Structures are given as C-alpha cells and as structure tokens.
Image (cartoon, rainbow, N blue to C red):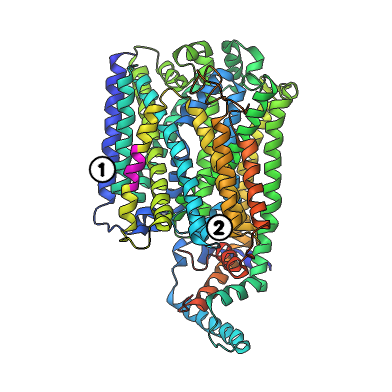
Amino acid sequence: MEKEAGPQTAGVRLDDPWDDVPAPGRGDQDGTRGAAALDASGAAEPDPRPSAADIYLEVHRSDAFREVRRRYRRFVAPAAIAFLLWYLAYVVAATTAPALMARPVAGAVNVAMVAGLGQFLTTFLLTWAYARHARLRRDRAALDLRWDTQEMTRGIGR
Amino acid sequence: MTGDHQALALLLFSAFIAVTLFITTWVSRNRQGSAEEFYAGGRLFSPMENGFAIAGDYMSAASFLGISGLIALFGYDGMLYSVGFLVAWLVVLLLVAELVRNCGRFTLADVVAARMAERPVRTAVGTSSVTVSVLYLVAQMVGAGSLVALLLGGTSDAARSWTVVGVGALMVIYVSFGGMRATTWIQIVKAVLLMAGALALTVLVLVHFHGNINSLLNTAAERSGHGKDFLAPGLRYGGDWTSRFDFISLGVALVLGTAGLPHILSRFYTVPTARAARRSVVWSIGLIGSFYLMTIVLGFGAAALVGSAEVRASNAAGNTAIPLLALDLGGGEGSTGGTILFAVVAAIAFATILAVVAGITLASSASVAHDLYASLRRPGRKKRSEVAVARTAAAGIGAVAIGLGLLAQDLNVAFLVGLAFAVAASANLPVLLYSLFWRNFTTRGAVWAVYGGLVPAVVLVLVSPVVSGSPTSLFPGVDFQLFPLENPGLVSIPLGFLAGWIGTVISPEPPDEAKHAEAEVRALTGAGAA
C-alpha cells in the first residue's frame, strides 16, 4: 500500500499532465491486462463482450477502486467537517461574543485578529495537506484504474 | 478630481481595452468554432495559467474596492468578508474541483445529467445557473457604472448609463469572438495587473508605517473615530439579532456559494486532467489568499491615512477608499505621484470589472446553449450549431444585463453579489454534492433540489427589506416585506438540501445503480473524461 508513496515512482510519470494522453507503450501493456479482465467477466455471461455499464460496475466493485475511494473519503470527510465547523464557530463568535473577540493579545492585536488570520493560515495548511495527500496517496492508483477502465471500455458502444 | 486624473485614467482604460481586443482577435485567428474550443478553450491551459484565470474570475471589483472600503469604514467587520471569500475555496478544492472536471464536459448540468434523466435535470440546472450568472452580472455592471462615474468625476446619469452599455458591448465582443480562450487570457492579464497593483499599494502602506503593523492598526483605530472598537467585530453587524443573523446568513452563503458559481466551475474544464484542475485550485488559493490579506492591510491603511470620515464623505458605501488611499500614498491631491497612482488604480478596477463580466457571460451562454437550448429545442425543428447558439446567447445575455444594469443603477452592489452567492449555494450546491456523493440520488431529487433552493432564495429576497419596506430598499415607497433578513442563505440553503432529500425519498423510480457506479468510477479515476 505504501508503494505508491515511493518518491522514485511518484515523480516521473505523474508530474507531466500530458502523460494522460495514452502513450503507445503503455496502451499495449494495458491492453493485455484489459483483455484478461474481459475474459474473466465474459466467462460468466452468455454475451462474451460485456457492456460499458457492466465494466463500470465491475471496476466499482473492485478492491483497487474501493481503496482509492476509501483514501479520498478518509481524508476529505473529516477535513471538510473540521474546517466548516471552525469557520462557523468563527462567524458565530464574531457576531455573538464581541467581548471575547475584543480581548487584547499583543499591542493592538486582539483575539478577533488572531482568529481571522488563523482562518487564513488553516486554509493554506489544509490546501497544502490535501494536495500532498492526493499526490502521494491517490493519483497513481487512480491513474492505473483509469487506464484499465479505458482499455476495457475501448470500442464498446453503450 | 482634477482633469489630470481623468485624462490619464481614460488613457489607461483605453490601453487595457485595446490590449484585450487584440488578445481576442489574436487567439481566435485560425480557430474553428468547435464547442470544445468555445466553451473550454481547447482544454490545454496549464495549471498555473488556469490558477491565475480562476483568481481573475473570482476577485471582482467588489472585493478590491468593496471589502477594503468596508474595512476602512467598519474596521474588523469588513475583514469577515475576506475570510469567507477565501475559506470557500476549501469546499471547491476538497469536494468539487477534481470530481467536476472528471464528470462533466462544459457545464455544471453535465455533472448532474450524467446520472439522471437528461432533459428535466438540464432544464433545472441550466435555469438556476443562468439566474445566478445574471444576478452576478448585474452587480458587476452597476459597479462599473458607479465606479467609472466616480473616478472620472462625472456624476451625470448619462455617463453612468453609457458606461454600463459600453461594458456590456465589450463583454459580448470578447465572448462571442474569442470564446473561452480569449476570456482566459483576459483573466490572466487582469489577475496579474490586480495582484501587482494591490502589492504595490500594500508595500507603500507598510513602508509608510516602517513595517510596524501595530502602529498601522493603532493609527487606523484612532482616525476611524471608534477607538479600539474599530479592531473588534460588532461595528456593522453588532446591533440587534436581525443584523447578527443576517451576517451569519451572509457568511454561510459566501462559504458555500463559491462552489456553485457556474463561471468558476466551467474554468475546471479548461485544463486537461483532474490533477491539473486540483493544481490550478492550489494556485488560485495562493493568489486569492494573498490578495485578501492585502485588502485587509489596504483597508486599515485607508482608515489610518485617509481617515474613515473622509472615505465616507467621498462615497457612503466606502467604494472609493482604495483610490483615495492611492492618491494619498502618491503624495496627495495635485502631486504627480498621486495622479499616476490614482489613475492606475482606477484602470485596474475597470479591468477587473471587464474581465469578470466576460467570464460570467461565457458561463451563462454555455448554460443557455449547452443545457437549455439542447434540452428545450423542439425535436422537429432544424438543429443549429451549439456554438452559434452560444454566441447569440452571449449577445442576448449582454442585452438583458445592460437592461437590468440600467434599471438597478441605484442599488447597493454588495447585496447583489451576496444574493448571487446565496442563490448559487441554495440551488446549485445541493444538487452538485448529492449527485457526486449520494448513491440513492434520483432524477426527481435532483430537480427538487434545484427548484427547492432556487425558488425560496428568490422569493425570500423579493419579500426582504432589500426590495421594500425600508428607506434603502429598491422600492422605498411600498411595503410588502415579510422576511427580516437581507440575505436568504440561512433559510434557503437548508431548504435546497431538504427538498433534494425529500424528492429522492419519495421518487417512484429506484436509483440507477449502474449509472451511479459509472459516475463514481469516472469521478475518482478520470476514466472516459472529456
């Protein structure tokens, strides 16, 4: 699981947005994998070529996809709840507890100033943390799934 | 204001218009009018370019002039806007940007329609997107009219009206001839100008106080006439509970509305991948965050150097605080430095308005052509090319915005912006979040979520003190006010979510498992993305 986080693998392919255009070498490699998956699902059904909807359902059920989704949700859900609550607390405090907010901290700077600048700081920090998490823990696995899914659905009408 | 200001400011305005028109013709040479090209600029912008363009789309004149002006007049309470406008971007980054890029092609309705019955959903989301865009557009046009009249010294109604008409005509030209590619480059140029201007003024303010923030704040508090209260919340929104709830309502609308603004969402389609969309949001958060930090310094700087009383005397809403600050920093009235800085700031504010209206017009013409026209067109009639429809729609929206802009000339601009955010948060955000994250969401739920947020938001504004029943309202003579708050967000946003939930629970058809699986796989991996 930590393999994706390896610096030697994370950088090379992913830093170039153009890499999302299928390179011939990679396409071939995935072609074989995609074909294998097709055979597996085709054996169970009378129609040897599954429809695009079946492929998406199958990918949706796969462990690889569940892992990507789990990593995304595990980070985003608590982070979103935390920053929304922190912002709401700030707005409510500013409107209902002005006395607390006016308490001086250092010189002309009071609690309200510190809280406001704290919002800026937490926004920057969370942005950095999310981008880092997505880059190291999610991008590579998601890209692999994208190739596999596109290989499987290639040439299949809806 | 002397003639020097006007001449120089006019010269800089004209230079900016010339540059942007040149960009428009330059980027649209040899381009075929495909929908991909018109709506998404070919999807080949880099994250940095798109980050600047997003920042350019988002930082309107209302932020540059309005927020600093509010800080100069009311101190800390103005700063609450800066915080809300920035924190909103976390919603965009974490929950929306990448998934929207992967699921849609050109508009917000694409994302929802991917899972649902296309016609009703497109009609609903298209309608709400156009409503949000037009509200936002009218705010910017009214702002342009009063700004130009103010800065050029002309207070005559004719000058304001012609400014509104001129801005409207220019934005239609940018959008119809240049599409997304021209609009994006105009945003980038504008964002660079705005950041540079704000940075220069901030440095001048800090140099003036020898980098001592403490003395800046103390001087501001002293000259504001409010003393220490100026640095704490409560001056503007402290009064009765109605105004406190109004502020909470505005705060919620600001933070949730950004993720539902159609012209922001359509920017994510101009980059090749979801990863590039994420990186452009990271860029724009950096730019927007530093910009709003600078507006705080500028607002307190204007209070300290110009004085709250003088700002209020020039413009009761505080919109002239930054130009007055520039005049003062450059050496005062009549000095060369003051004249130049004043004209530069005026030109930057004007560029800001032009760029923002172009972005919104493009997004709303996409909603009209790609969503409304495509789903409402009678099957029997001849199908016209979507881009041709979009160009016509841009002209039509321009005409509507000019008309409403002329009607609403005396309206407070800040309220219109707040209202656009509230409608976006009530009508667009629930349906977007439900269709991205809720497995059992159905077509009926989607349609109900949109109308269940849109209708209350608009109706509550119509019966709010903004429209009638108070001396500052749109129709001061009559009184049909029923709802105490100016901003409907606190009520209409929960209603939007609730309506979507009820519609889903009572819908006759079961949720489409396969389409949900496809949407989720595409959203998180980018498989099959446009």
Q: Chain of mark 1?
A: B
Residue B22 got which mark? 1
Instruction: Establish if A52 lies above or below B244.
Output: below
Q: Relative to the observer, which residue lies in front, B80 or A131?
A: B80
Mark 2 or mark 1, earlier in chain: 1
Residue at screen point 50% across, 81% down:
A31
Q: Quadrant of the C terminus of chain B?
A: bottom left
Amino acid type, mark 1:
Phe
Query: Callout 1: few (<14), some (14-19), or many (20+) C-alpha neighbours within 10 Å?
Result: few
Q: Picture coordinates of residue B303 (x, y %)? A: 53, 17
Same chain shared by disc 2 and disc 1: yes
Question: Magenta segment: does it hold B419?
Answer: no
Query: In the structure shown, which secondary structural element does the residue marked by tag 1 occupy?
Result: helix
Residue at screen point 47% across, 81% down:
A28
Type of secondary structure dominating the magenta stretch: helix
Q: Relative to the observer, which residue lies in front, B385 or B247?
A: B385
Residue indicated by mark 2 = B99
Residue at screen point 52% across, 65% down:
A12
Magenta residues (range): B393-399
> Is residue A58 in view from this perspective?
yes
* Residue B356 sits in quarter: top left
